[in-house]
């Protein structure tokens, strides 16, 4: 599936590594995605709420299907991230590994599960380029 097609048909994004700190990239991109009309589910065990949305401690806690998981975790955690994605009740259609968030080492495992993987991609830039 084409990157722009995925973005244009997606409704719900889980942001793994979401932040309540306005100076963090994850905060700004979450805000952008909300303004673009997407439902954003923040995921970070350090918070209970971010930008007015209930923040979940892990991807496994998400009950509803999500279209995209946007990853804001250090590359050294890519195996842990992949395990968490593969353990989700409803697998996402796509995963965006933001710049420096890893992904190359787990791409094959995720793709074997039917998930489209984008590595070193900023979802905000991609979304803007698709408009």
Image (tube, rainbow, N blue to C red):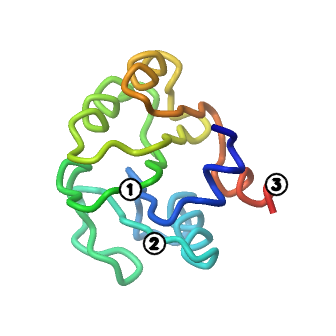
What is the quadrant of residue 128 in the picture?
A: bottom right
Residue 94 location (% of width, % of height): 50, 41
**Which label is found at residue 66?**
1
What distance separates the C-alpha of mark 1 from that of mark 2?
9 Å
What distance separates the C-alpha of mark 3 from that of mark 2?
20 Å
Mark closer to the observer (3, 1): 1
Q: Is residue 129 left or right of residue 110?
A: right
Q: Which residue is mark 2?
A: 39
| SS for callout 3 | helix
Viewer-proximal residue, 43 or 76? 43
Q: Which residue is mark 3?
A: 129
Residue 130 location (% of width, % of height): 79, 55
Q: Residue furthest bottom?
A: 52
Residue 45 location (% of width, % of height): 22, 56
* Rendered residue at 68%/50% (across/down): 5
Q: Count residues near mark 2 (Cα–Cα under 10 Å), then give few for <14, some for 14-19, many for 20+.
A: some
What is the quadrant of residue 47 in the picture?
A: bottom left
Q: Is residue 122 left or right of residue 85?
A: right
Mark 1 vs 2: CB contact within 8 A:
no
Q: Count residues near mark 3 (Cα–Cα under 10 Å), then give few for <14, some for 14-19, many for 20+.
A: few
* Rendered residue at 66%/60% (across/down): 8
Circle nearer the N terminus (3, 1): 1
Q: Is residue 129 left or right of residue 118?
A: right
């Amino acid at each position: 599936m084409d990157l722009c097609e995925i973005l244009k048909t997606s409704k719900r994004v889980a942001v793994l590594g979401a932040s309540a700190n306005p100076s963090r990239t994850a905060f700004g991109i979450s805000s952008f995605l909300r303004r673009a009309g997407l439902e954003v589910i923040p995921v970070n065990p350090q918070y209970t709420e971010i930008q007015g949305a209930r923040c979940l401690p892990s991807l496994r806690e998400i009950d509803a299907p999500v279209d995209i998981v946007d990853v804001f975790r250090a590359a050294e955690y890519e195996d842990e991230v992949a395990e968490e994605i593969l353990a989700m009740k409803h697998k996402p259609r796509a995963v965006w590994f933001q710049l420096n968030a890893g992904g190359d080492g787990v791409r094959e495992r995720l793709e074997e599960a039917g998930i489209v993987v984008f590595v070193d991609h900023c979802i905000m830039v991609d979304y803007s380029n698709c408009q």
